[in-house]
């Protein structure tokens, strides 16, 4: 099922913190119109609004004057009424959250941006390179993208047939971060979103404490040399000519979970 068809079949009840990123402001209001007679929607309206807030900034307009609406529209909001009950309506202004900074990235939206967009976000926020990002941000990025990095002297990075050329040919986007006379290249390519297989195992009784002790084998240290007997290795001399894109520094990583709440803009709008 393609993304366009999936969007048409989404309803307020089937929205999740993940797929809500697939819809736009007008889609939200259309969904609400089609569900205004659903008793469950009426009784749990705040729950559905909170779900929408995963991907949208949502403001309830207390002042419904044309001047106030105009201010919100100039800021990119879409405004419409939603029904909370037979005699209850509220005016909502909603706007899709922009992904501009690395801190805007979440486990829910990371699959909804392209590699080119990721590179744009990284470029806007960068300073010290890939390792300068927090571990939590790197985990989020690596949930949605294959990431690899290499750091080489400027004149060797674009060497014909080298890693840079191969990665570009393989569909990776790249960000180059200057580090003096060296350059760190960060390569990114979107991973396909896959469901994790659910594995079931036959239940078995938990082992007793005595059985656990019997199963534990003592570590064999008979042939293990004492620390005092190990001679330190001679430090190797660093030579610029021995460095290639294959042996200098290339990193690959994996993933893990946080969630961020965007602040509303009502406080920033003067009446």
Image (spheres, rainbow, N blue to C red):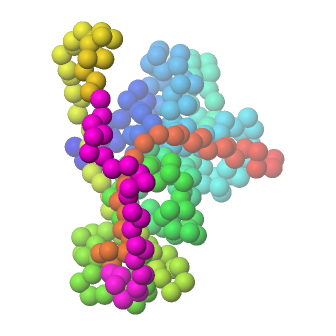
| Stretch of the chain drawn in magenta | 218-244
* x 63%, y 30%: residue: 90
User: What is the magenta segment's predominant secondary structure?
Assistant: loop
147 vs 124, nearest the viewer: 147
* x 30%, y 46%: residue: 224
* x 76%, y 45%: residue: 267
- From the viewer's perspective, is 255 left or right of 85? left
- From the viewer's perspective, is 159 left or right of 56? left
Q: Residue lying farthest front?
A: 229
98 vs 108, nearest the viewer: 108
Residue 129 image offset from top left, x and y in percent: 51, 68
Residue 268 seen in this snapshot: yes
- Residue 237 part of the magenta segment: yes
45 vs 221, nearest the viewer: 221
Q: Is residue 240 above or below residue 71?
A: below
Q: Residue lying farthest left?
A: 202
- From the viewer's perspective, is 20 left or right of 204? right
* x 56%, y 69%: residue: 128
Q: State the quadrant of the N terminus.
A: top left
How many marks the image carries: the answer is: 0
Residue 222 image offset from top left, x and y in percent: 27, 40
Q: Is residue 271 above or below residue 205?
A: below
Residue 199 image offset from top left, x and y in percent: 22, 27
């Amino acid at each position: 099922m393609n993304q366009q068809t999936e969007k048409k079949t989404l309803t307020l009840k089937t929205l999740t913190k993940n797929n809500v990123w697939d819809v736009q402001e007008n889609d939200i209001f259309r969904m609400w119109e089609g569900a205004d007679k659903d008793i469950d929607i009426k009784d749990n309206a705040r729950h559905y609004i909170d779900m929408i807030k995963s991907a949208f900034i949502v403001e309830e307009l207390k002042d419904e004057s044309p001047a106030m609406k105009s201010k919100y529209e100039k800021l990119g909001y879409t405004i419409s009424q939603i029904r909370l009950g037979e005699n209850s309506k509220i005016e909502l202004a909603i706007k899709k959250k922009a992904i501009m900074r690395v801190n805007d990235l979440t486990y829910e939206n990371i699959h909804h941006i392209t590699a080119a967009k990721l590179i744009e976000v990284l470029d806007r926020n960068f300073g010290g390179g890939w390792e300068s990002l927090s571990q939590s941000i790197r985990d989020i990025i690596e949930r949605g993208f294959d990431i690899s990095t290499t750091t080489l002297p400027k004149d060797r990075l674009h060497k014909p047939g080298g890693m840079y050329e191969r990665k570009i040919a393989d569909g990776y986007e790249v960000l180059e971060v200057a580090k003096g006379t060296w350059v760190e290249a960060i390569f990114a390519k979107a991973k396909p979103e896959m469901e994790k297989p659910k594995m079931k195992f036959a239940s078995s009784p938990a082992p007793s404490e005595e059985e656990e002790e019997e199963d534990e084998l003592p570590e064999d240290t008979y042939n293990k040399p004492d620390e005092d007997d190990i001679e330190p290795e001679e430090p190797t001399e660093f030579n610029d000519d021995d460095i290639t894109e294959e042996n200098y520094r290339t990193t690959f990583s994996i993933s893990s979970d946080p969630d961020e709440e965007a602040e509303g803009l009502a406080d920033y709008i003067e009446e």
